[in-house]
Image (cartoon, coloured by chain):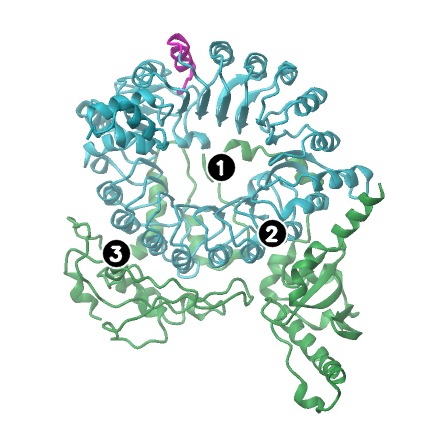
Amino acid sequence: MNIFPDEVIEQIFGYVTSQRDRNALSLVCKNWHKLERCSRKSVLIGNCYSISPERVIERFPELKSLTLKGKPHFADFNLVPHGWGGFVYPWIEALAKTKVDLEKLKLKRMVVTDEGLELLARSFMNFKSLVLLSCEGFTTTGLAAIAANCRFLRELDLQENEVDDHKGQWLSCFPDCCTSLVSLNFACLKGEINLGALERLVARSPNLKSLRLNHTVPLSALQRILMQAPQLVDLGIGSFIHDPHSEVYTRLKNTIIKCKSMTSLSGFFEVLPGCLRAIYPVCMNLTALNLSYAAGIHCRELIKLIRRCGKLQRLWIMDCIGDYGLGVVASTCKDLQELRVFPSVLIGLNGPAGVSEKGLVAISMGCTKLHSLLYFCQQMTNAALITVAKNCPNCIRFRLCILDPTKPDPDTLQPLDEGFGAIVQSCKQLRRLSLSGQLTDRVFLYIGVYAEQLEMLSIAFAGQSDKGMMYVLNGCKKLRKLEIRDSPFGDPALLTDMGKYETMRSLWMSSCDVTIGACKALAEKMRRLNVEIFNENEKVDCSVDGGQKVQKMYLYRTLAGRRNDAPEHVWIL
Amino acid sequence: MDERSRNEVSPQLLDLIPNEREWQMNRNEGKSSEERKLELRLGPPGEEWSLGGKMKNTNTEREESLLSLGCFPSSNMSHAILSPNNGFQSKASPWPNYHHQGNNKASSPFLQLTSTPPVMGKEASQNCCPKVVELQNGGGGGDSKVFSPSSANTAVSQPNTSQKRTAPAPVVGWPPIRSFRKNLASSSASKAPPESQPEQHNKVAGKKPVDTYGNKGLFVKINMDGVPIGRKVDLNAYDSYESLSSAVDELFRGLLAAQRDSSAGGVHSKQEEEKAITGLLDGSGEYTLVYEDNEGDRMLVGDVPWHMFVSTVKRLRVLKSSELSTFTLGGKQEKISLDSAMK
């Protein structure tokens, strides 16, 4: 095994970058374990409570890049009570204390505070990249600390965070000597920024490739910025309201033409009909387009735009595009790999009635390279799902959300078991699946039998009995995350295979039929699981009888034992 | 094709298309040992897009064994509910015949299902809806009482409300959208005037909303590449892209032939030279139908729903299909270069 000297093996390991591959390397033998861990630069901790920061640092002393995920996925939909957890401060503190040479920190669904950001900014001299996804708890003051102190900052990427905007001058805090920015995304911020500071920052950042503005940045500023940065590859437009006959518009169009490298567009938080023609010049080069925040664009305009985007690989759009519009996508965007269609009903638009199974089928026929799908629709049929399954056997992520979550096939009035069954059977590489519509236990049988690569399954308002959940737990060998809400799965299902949960990252069950007694039994038996129970914001009565049903349960495997930062209303068994 | 006997066999090989009887109208029963190819042909809403058996012929052994007929007593369900005239076969929409491969069971690496498969017979189908109701009422405390019996029944009794926007009672966390999206500026929405709504609604009826035109004709000019004489068409006379397309064919067929005739030396009679102009809408023909809309943009005819088209079209053109890619980049684009050249 050890024919080569360690230095050579280490060199070879340098080419292996995927975390899973490196994990595999470390299991080969003790020597490889040692070599691997000492040379590992980048670590992903999928559940911040599964292990303590100290242990991570101890194992990987050369750590440069850390990714942490905190709250369970359903926190995105307000199902996790406020204050549940996911605090990053202890991690930053531990990293600072042990003098790790941290360069990159990426956090998802965590609670970040200004103190944490300030500590981060002061502690790591070579810090280069901060990416925050769906986080909360910080303000622009924390951002100012990052801007002011991270001299070699390359990336500040804020996506869909809840940030308290003190409308301060955080952008002005980037020192004049900071010229290293490659990516700046503040689209989620609600407050105004100093436009002059922004323009100067862009002007002195020759490497800037990605810039996403928030809705307060007006068109005139956008135009000036683009003049300074025609090399941009990815642009997030803030406000895009203009008069198509004005000089501002003409100037903008002329400026945009010069952005020959631009391949990705997003934003459009404010846009009026007729405004989009200004971006026509860059459409033919676009590989990624996100119009899912643009509430004011109508079907016809979307179609005109899409017709020009022959190279699209990733499209996020609202359902105002309609089935018809999706037909245009299908015939135009032959390279499409990822499609997300979001519902416009939520923002009170009175437009046409969204999308249905017809649009999805059209896409599946035209876009043969499709592998990732998120589709919010009015209805779905088994026949359509079967067709999609056959047309897109390479699908990796399939997330369907019918707005009425228990709606059966409207043509046959049958549950959608057969349709989803076809999906899991045909898409052999399927890793992520979200179900909706009327579903019996049968769909879970299909999933258990066929979905061999499935890693994440989301279930809502589905199934008839414990068997449903048991089929999944029994069958899906690679399952890592299972999240269930409002489904009739109870104690027998929960307790049928307790060891299974140690092979998974986590299990979420809310509004199901699981009782406190069963959760206690599980927690008692499986010491390496944390079983947490919570209700909406009331303290759970620990003395209550074991037969009481649990409102929300979240369990996850852990080597860190019980956590001690849980609020009162979260009961850790 | 004895499904009953296979009922007792275990491990169960699953039939994902248990209602195959209904879905294979054209083939004979009892063809179990024959090889069938997976074949799907399909067309999206009301249009002939690229059809064709561009089907993935799934040939792996695994696939074959997977698709062999299983045993779910769904046949009970299917008899009860699906008849050849029901379900999707009866519709105009071209859901295809679905054939699947024969019963080469072979050894299948299947999961041994230790429990008997759920009996999904008639009772399941009938209980589905009531079960849903029970589920909601029995489920987690205080969270949601969404699916009151009335709404469940509504779903059952009105299967074709596909075009209407459903307004489900609010459930916490449903639909699963991040708050960020829910809080999207409705300021944009309020500024934007709603586009003519009836597009989708009237798609079914095939009739235009009244206000845009009354009894007067809606004449638009139409020109064709290679034919010096333009014509006019009355769009009110048509109710779909297909009828417009055949009208264009009739209109120009003769003229085109005459044109060719004259350039070829005028020896042959007109009759022989007349060739139908086909494939105007899907790019498959020698010519393609395009139009200019009220915003000055050139569009492919067929891109937007019919009613939207009629209300926004200003003139029509029949272009040579080979000219298509350049046309989309022309027009406005040229205008800009001119502008910037002048600056």
Does the rendering let one see residue A529?
A: no
As drawn, the chain in cyan is A
Magenta stretch: helix, strand or loop mostly: helix
State the residue at coordinates (30%, 67%).
B79
Q: Position of residue A459 (x, y in %)?
A: 35, 41
Whether residue A94 is in magenta: the answer is: yes
Dot 2 and dot 3 within a common chain:
no
**Residue mark closest to the camera, 2 vs 3:** 2
Q: Colour of chain B?
A: green
Residue B169: x and y, percent? 48, 41
**Which residue is rendered at x = 28% and y = 17% of the image?**
A562
| Quarter of the rendering occupied by the N terminus of chain A | top left
Mark 3 lies on residue: B120
Dot 1 lies on which element?
Answer: loop
Q: Circle 3 sits in a helix, a strand or a loop, which is it? A: loop
Do dots 3 and 1 share one subunit? Answer: yes
Which residues make up the magenta segment? A85-99
What distance separates the C-alpha of mark 3 from that of mark 1? 33 Å
**Category of crowding for the residue at label 1, using alpha-carbon neighbours closer than 10 angstroms: few (below 14), some (14–19), many (at least 20):** some
Q: Splitting the image into 4 quarters, where does residue B220 fall?
A: bottom right
Q: Is residue B21 left or right of residue A216?
A: left
What residue would you read off at disc 2? A352
Q: Position of residue B154 (x, y in %)?
A: 45, 53
- The kind of residue on which mark 1 rests is Ile
Give the x, y percent position of residue A255.
73, 38
The amino acid pointed to by label 3 is Met
Mark 2 is surrounded, within 10 Å at the Cα level, by few (under 14), some (14 to 19) or many (20 or more) other residues, namely: many
Q: Which mark is residue B177?
A: 1
**Left or right of A115, for residue B14:** left
User: Is B193 situated above or below A113?
Assistant: below
